[in-house]
Amino acid sequence: MLNFTYYNPVKIVFGKGTIKELPNLIPAENKVMMIYGGGSIKENGVYEQVAKAMAGRPLAEFSGIEPNPRYETCIKCAESIRKQGSDFLLAVGGGSVLDATKFIAAAFCYQGDDPWDFMKDVSRIPTEALPLGSVLTLPATGSEMNSFAVISRDSTQEKLAFSSPKIFPKFSILDPTTTYSLPPRQTANGIVDAYVHVLEQYMTFDAGSPLQDRQAEAILLTLIEEGPKAMAKPKSYSARSNIMWCAANALNGLIGCGVPQDWLTHMVGHEITALYGLDHAQTLALIYPAVIRHFKERKKQKLLQYALRVWDLAEGDENARIDAAIEKTDEFFRSLGVGTRLADYNIPAQAGKLVAQRLAKRGQPLGERGDVKPIDVENIIGLRA
């Protein structure tokens, strides 16, 4: 097992009716800015629950955070916070709202000229941020329980990530009933997102970490079992609860302790979103099966383990089992209604070359061994034609 340090200070408040706990989680002296998206929280009753819980407390609002949150919108929110004098941020929404709120918390305190600096240069990692909490309404990214955020910038066509221990939420409220009204597309995206998060920490090479492997496999198996139930019965409390907890555990750092990780799919996916506007999970479903097919020799041991333990594939030779596991993964995504081919999204054939060039320009090591080349990226995308 590799050396690691694990730290996660997020307080999770889980279950039906837990939004009413907000006054006990935010210090009375704080002036709160509630940050949310396009207004769905007003339609599903979450806004009303938050307002009721915070009655009598200073509560300002900023709405309009987009899916794939935009830098430009975040900067407007930071300006609003300064005008309102808010000193605690409350993200109410899904991963995009959470990511935006994390960036805003750090951008507000940043002393440099442009907060985008710390997105492009890890040496400028934020050392201060406003405190924040969250009420999660879309389980997918795990942002409710980690120190990562991803932001897009229209002016440069970039989608970049950053991390800082200063942006861990102080708490996250996870009430599965807030997800009952999610459209099928968002439910499916959340399942795919969590599933691929797990695989990117699992599907590398053996590091002598059987506990982490089995924790990862447990999440995968639960998503395979519970995902279709949530799609068929959106108000199944059991299915929604299990998906919500899976998504948090998929990226709260625990299954990644002491193991090599491969975030190539995410890096490629971010470029595709920046260029073509796909949902984040759509890019993951598009790219991940091609990544494991392209690198099936170097990932052979883990692919065989995945085939047996997750898909119960024990018959046939090794190559047949690996190919079947890859196909099962692709089929699972498609069964949820998420496309897995370039043609599903009208993405042109030249996308592979363009994405490869953009990633090469960034110079960031890719893959669990840091040796993925531009031609690999181009070939991987080419497999999805």
Image (cartoon, rainbow, N blue to C red):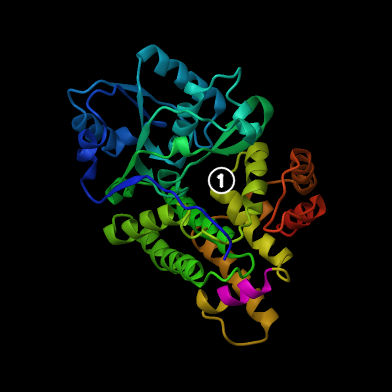
Comparing 139 with 349, the one in front is 139
**Would residue 367 be seen by someone viewing this image from the given angle?**
yes
Q: How many marks?
A: 1
Tell me if 149 is positioned left or right of 371 in this view: left
> Mark 1 falls on what kind of element?
helix
Which quarter of the picture shows residue 384? bottom right
Q: Residue at x 45, y 28 (%)?
A: 129
Q: Which secondary structure type mostly characterizes the magenta part of the structure?
A: helix
Q: Amino acid at mark 1?
A: His
Q: Is residue 254 left or right of residue 174?
A: right
115 in magenta? no
In the image, residue 74 sits, relative to residue 179, either above or below, namely above
In reply to whether residue 300 is colored magenta, the answer given is: yes
Does 254 sit above or below residue 107? below
Q: Residue at x 66, y 43 (%)?
A: 272
Q: Nearer the viewer, residue 190 or 363?
A: 363
Q: Residue 172 location in percent, x, y?
A: 33, 43
Which residues fall within the magenta stretch?
299-306
For residue 313, side relative to residue 64 (left or right): right
| Relative to 129, 300 lies left or right | right
- Residue at mark 1: 280
